[in-house]
Amino acid sequence: VDRITSMIGASWTNSTKELYGTSLLVFHVFCNLNNIPDESRCPISSNTLATFLASCASAHSGSTLANYAARIKAWHIVHGCSWDINEAEYKVILEGATRLAPNTSRCPQRDPFTVDILTVFHSLFDHNDPCDTAIFTCLVVSFYCVARLGEFTVPTIQSFNPAKHIT
């Protein structure tokens, strides 16, 4: 059983698992504060899920609430519990929670990254410095691949994994 749980858990990256841990903590605190017994937490009912998300909707962004719900669903999968939430209802719950999210939870739209910005960066870098050249190359490749910079970079050198990251 432990091996099966471990195999299922391996489908999520460590960073995803860390985020999911926070989600479960918030869910369990909500359940404790509202006297929701363990047997009503898993398997979760549509009503409990909707009540939990509604209680968070005025304080969190829609994407945060979607992550909370995804983690609760993953928790059910990892532990072999049935997920009896109707997918259409699940989608509507998340859409409603997103619409109720406060404006302060939304980041303002950023200006687009343009060729003009690349030109400015090009003029600022020392092209004889391998580090500057690598950074500029990463920016250009990310720009023309229409990719997020995080898909081409790692947060820290310690988190580099040659099996996962471009070499």
Image (cartoon, rainbow, N blue to C red):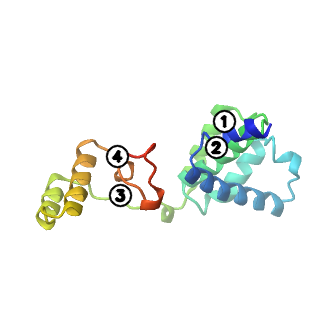
Disc 4 from disc 1: Cα separation: 43 Å
Disc 4 from disc 2: Cα separation: 42 Å
Mark sitting earlier along the chain (1/3):
1
Mark sitting earlier along the chain (4/2):
2
Task: Decide: is 44 above or below 116.
Answer: above
The secondary element bearing badge 2 is classed as helix
Number of the front mark, 4 or 1: 4
Mark sitting earlier along the chain (3/2):
2
The residue where tag 1 is placed is 89
Disc 3 from disc 2: Cα separation: 25 Å
Amino acid carrying label 2: it is Ile
Q: Position of residue 134 (x, y in %)?
A: 23, 56
Number of the front mark, 4 or 2: 4
| CA neighbours of label 4 inside 10 A, class few (<14), some (14 to 19), many (20+) | few
Q: Measuring 39% from the left and 53% from the top, which residue is drawn there?
A: 150
| CA neighbours of label 2 inside 10 A, class few (<14), some (14 to 19), many (20+) | many
The secondary element bearing badge 3 is classed as loop
Closest to the observer, 2 or 11: 2
Amino acid carrying label 1: it is Glu
Q: Measuring 72% from the left and 53% from the top, which residue is drawn there?
A: 52
Amino acid carrying label 4: it is Thr
| CA neighbours of label 3 inside 10 A, class few (<14), some (14 to 19), many (20+) | few
